Image (spheres, grey):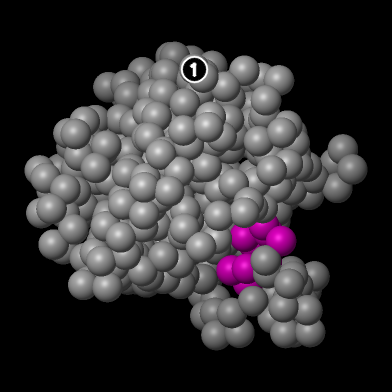
Amino acid sequence: MTISDPLDLEKTLTGAHVCHLRGSRAILAHRQLLQDFAATTGQHTAMHGLQFKLEHDFARHKTPHLICIVSGHDVSAPLSLPALLGCVLLFEHRLASCNTGLFATGDNTGLGTVIAPSELRAQVAALASCAALRTGRMVLTCFRNPSPNLTRMVFPSGQQGLRAVQVREVQDQLRLYPTYDLTLDTLGKRTRTHLRYYRKRLQSETGCVFVPDAASHIPPSQLASLNNSSLEPVRQRAFDLQFHAAAELPGGYVCGLRASNGRWLCLAGGWRQGRTSLIQWQMNSAGFRKFSLSTAFRAFLIAHEISLGTTQLCFQGGTSHSISHAFRQEYAVDLMLRRPGPLLSLLVRLIPYLAEQDPALANRGNFLVDALRNRHLHWTPLSYPAAASRTHSYP
């Protein structure tokens, strides 16, 4: 779908309705449809980690919502690929068993929140956010944009509330070329040297091999010991979830490096769709710092993905490794909507102050707090006078 004319955009969305799915079971019932739809929008693998997102510790005290923008006015019709224009995955914070009306993205990189064609993505985010705001108090929707310049957003007539928008740079995607050497030529000289050196050294001293189907060699009884012996152990429930979500679902995989003595040096899991591969998580074994396992593993991984015909390798959340200097530059957009009122106004002013007093506050997986800590957010009304709305004044 390609829509370049603003009037065509409004015409397409005017004849649409909202389908609101609540809870993990209702959302997962449409898992295959969502994966297929993501492929049509060019957002490969964006919906492959759905079960992981819905069952992760991050989501334990939240209610998931999938808000779909669907063409036509027949609200009773089942969701279908031809009718789906876009969808937005949000999580509503709960206090005990009560929903709070505070909605937030589950992914601050913008990869897995708004699924829609690039020319519709901002508009789908706006409509879905307004749908959430009708029953909520505040909504944060993060989506990926190919440039820092946003397409215009039209909000429903009469929608009450305030909005703020901020754009962030993100880098998490590496383009892969037909051969390993061609791909390495796009990296910095020092990065190329390290990838080749640590791969060769690790092979020489441990006799390791790359195992593309590592999950088939690891019985469930070994998961606890693998986690406990890793460089950074996590809660066992979280480790089991990330392993099984990648190993047992269609499109998923767990690969790894295994030494000649049988010990697993590295494990990583993710999903593939089309020519895109997404690494969701990686585990390194403790006791091998001098070998730079992360660097060696990336060298093996890149070579393997190229052999499969992969052209884009994504690292969920990015990486601090120097390989990131060759990542493609994209942008994440934070669209924030809130109801007017003194309590929410106080919250918006208070969070930047609290974040300064306690820097860890913004590093606890609360993306709403992370977005609101910016003191320079500019809030404007959602509703405009009729004459102004016809001039299409958007952020």
Quarter of the image holding residue 131? top right
Quarter of the image holding residue 45? top left
**Residue 368 covered by magenta stretch:** yes
Question: Type of residue at label 1?
Answer: Ser
Where 47 sits versus 104, above or below?
Answer: above
Farthest front residue in view: 205
Which residue is pictured at 62% across the width and 54% down the height? Answer: 287
- 164 vs 368, nearest the viewer: 368
Q: Position of residue 225 (x, y in %)?
A: 71, 33
Which residue is pictured at 53% across the width and 67% down the height? Answer: 163
Mark 1: few/some/many CA within 10 Å (<14, 14-19, 20+): few
Quarter of the image holding residue 114? top left
- 191 vs 144, nearest the viewer: 191
Which residue is pictured at 68% across the width and 59% down the height? Answer: 366
Q: Position of residue 382 (x, y in %)?
A: 50, 65
User: Which residues fall within the magenta stretch?
Assistant: 364-372
* In-image side of 23 versus 277 (left or right): right
Image quadrant in which the C terminus is located:
bottom left
Kindly tell me whether residue 316 is visible in this rendering: yes
**Residue 112 covered by magenta stretch:** no
- 221 vs 333, nearest the viewer: 221
Which residue is pictured at 25% across the width and 66% down the height? Answer: 193
Kindly tell me whether residue 340 is visible in this rendering: no
* In-image side of 311 versus 287 (left or right): left
At mark 1, the secondary structure is helix
Farthest right residue in view: 96
Q: Which residue is mark 1?
A: 216
* In-image side of 104 versus 258 (left or right): right
